[in-house]
Amino acid sequence: MEYTDFDDSKEKRREYLKLLLPKEYASSIFTINIDRLFKNGIRGIIIDLDDTLLPRGVYKIPFAVYSWIEKVKEYGIKICLVSNGSSSKRIEYVSNSLGIKGFAFSLKPLPFALKKAMAYLKTSPEQTAIIGDQILTDILGGNLVKAHTILVKPVAEEVSLVRMPMRFVENFLINFLKLEIDS
Ligand SMILES: [Mg+2]
């Protein structure tokens, strides 16, 4: 009987681990196959800002990011920005420039902001892709709300000593979970 209990907890642990697994892993937003997402029923995208769209603290938006957002919109896929960042001024600037809605102070992986964003997009979790560069915030949060999660490589090298341990843990997880890029 005790063995059964042991198996149960092993199964549980596997379930928890699955919450960290992105459904896709891409080298950047630009290599994500939007056509395939649309064909698979995705109608809304929730995208992270820092190190997913732009390096941290950066205001200047590359032309490629503008055209990527346009391409998403042309598919009829709605998109909004959900950031854990606290600079509402910058988040507002970026989202206004891109012509999309932005949510700041999101506290990912907590589900509140992601649910609010889905309500804004009017999409169900199955119709929603959540894109970000961090497993412990974007992917975990996205999996908790049962959306289609896509991990991307951070756009910039980490320079902040405060965040380096975080990047270390993320890289450890990427190896541990045996994630294959652009799979
Ligand atoms: Mg990020």
Image: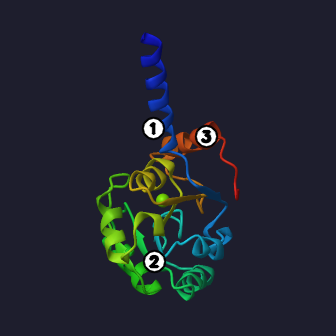
Task: Say few, some or many: other residues with alpha carbon within 10 Å of mark 2 (under 14 / 14 to 19 / 20 or more).
Answer: many
Res. 119 mark: none
Viewer-nearest residue: 86 or 179: 179
Separation (CA) of disc 2 from disc 1: 28 Å
Which three-letter amino acid code belongs to the residue tagged 3? Leu
Q: Dot 2 corresponds to which residue?
A: 79
The x, y position of residue 152, in whole percent, is: 59, 59
Quadrant containing the N terminus in the rendered view = top left
Which three-letter amino acid code belongs to the residue tagged 2? Ile
The x, y position of residue 67, in whole percent, is: 60, 85
**What element does badge 3 sit on?**
loop
Mark sitting earlier along the chain (1/3): 1
Q: Dot 1 corresponds to which residue?
A: 16
Looking at the image, residue 10 lies above or below residue 149 = above
Residue 49 visible to an observer of this rendering: no
The x, y position of residue 28, in whole percent, is: 64, 65
Looking at the image, residue 121 lies above or below residue 114 = below
Q: In this image, 151 relative to 78: left or right?
A: right
Q: Residue furthest front?
A: 1
Residue 80 visible to an observer of this rendering: yes
At 53% from the left and 40% from the top, the residue drawn is 169
Which three-letter amino acid code belongs to the residue tagged 1? Tyr
User: Hey, which quadrant is residue 107 in on the image?
Assistant: bottom left
The x, y position of residue 87, in whole percent, is: 34, 68
| Residue mark closest to the camera, 1 vs 3 | 1
Q: Residue furthest top?
A: 2
Res. 177 mark: 3
